[in-house]
């Protein structure tokens, strides 16, 4: 899919969620966030629309995900008790780490 297809699907999804889900109000920032998020999965591809716009920040985004993974692991290890919540944080940290790689 092209970047314009990703963006269109993200914006339509944002409008649909705002209109159909009770308790979620229609807001322009929310729809803009949905549009941005629809382009975010392609950040690792150098030819993606968002990567071209961000330019030099592509490596910073990868380092930010890696740093986020380390922060989640540290928080889970030092602040949470053994159990389901700690495992959830470790799983999220693994996902962030894989995105950063």
Image (cartoon, grey):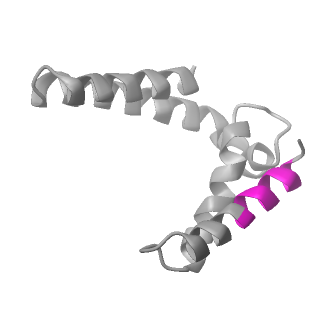
**Which stretch did the figure color magenta?**
3-12
**Foreground pick, 18 / 54:** 18
Residue at image x 11%, y 31%? 79
Percent x, y for residue 53? 76, 52
Residue 44 % position (x, y):
70, 31
Please tell me which residue lies in front, 43 or 15: 15
Q: Which residue occupies the foreground of this view, 20 or 32?
A: 20
Q: Is the magenta stretch mostly helix, strand or loop?
A: helix
Q: Position of residue 94 (x, y in %)?
A: 43, 21
At x 63% / y 52%, what residue is drawn? 37
Residue 41 figure quarter:
top right
Position of residue 56 in the picture relative to residue 27 (left or right): right
In the depicted structure, whether residue 19 falls above or below residue 45: below
The reply, left or right, for residue 54 in relation to residue 5 is left
Q: Is residue 58 left or right of residue 79?
A: right
Dividing the picture into quadrants, the one containing residue 46 is: top right
Quarter of the image that includes the C terminus? top right
Horizontal arrangement in the rendering, residue 62 relative to residue 13 (left or right): left
Residue in view at x 31 percent, y 28 percent: 88
Residue 30 lies in what quarter of the image?
A: bottom right
Percent position of residue 64, x then y: 47, 35
Determine the residue positioned at 30% across, 30% down. Answer: 72
11 inside magenta stretch: yes
Which image quarter holds the N terminus?
Answer: top right
């Amino acid at each position: 899919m092209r970047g314009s297809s990703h963006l269109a699907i993200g914006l339509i999804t944002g409008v649909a969620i705002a209109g159909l889900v009770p308790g979620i109000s229609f807001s322009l920032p929310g729809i803009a966030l949905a549009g941005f998020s629809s382009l975010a999965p392609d950040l690792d591809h150098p030819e993606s629309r968002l990567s071209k716009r961000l330019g030099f920040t592509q490596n910073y985004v990868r380092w930010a995900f890696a740093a986020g993974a380390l922060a989640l692991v540290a928080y889970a290890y030092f602040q949470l008790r053994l159990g389901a919540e700690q495992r959830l944080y470790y799983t999220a940290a693994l996902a962030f780490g894989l995105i950063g790689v």
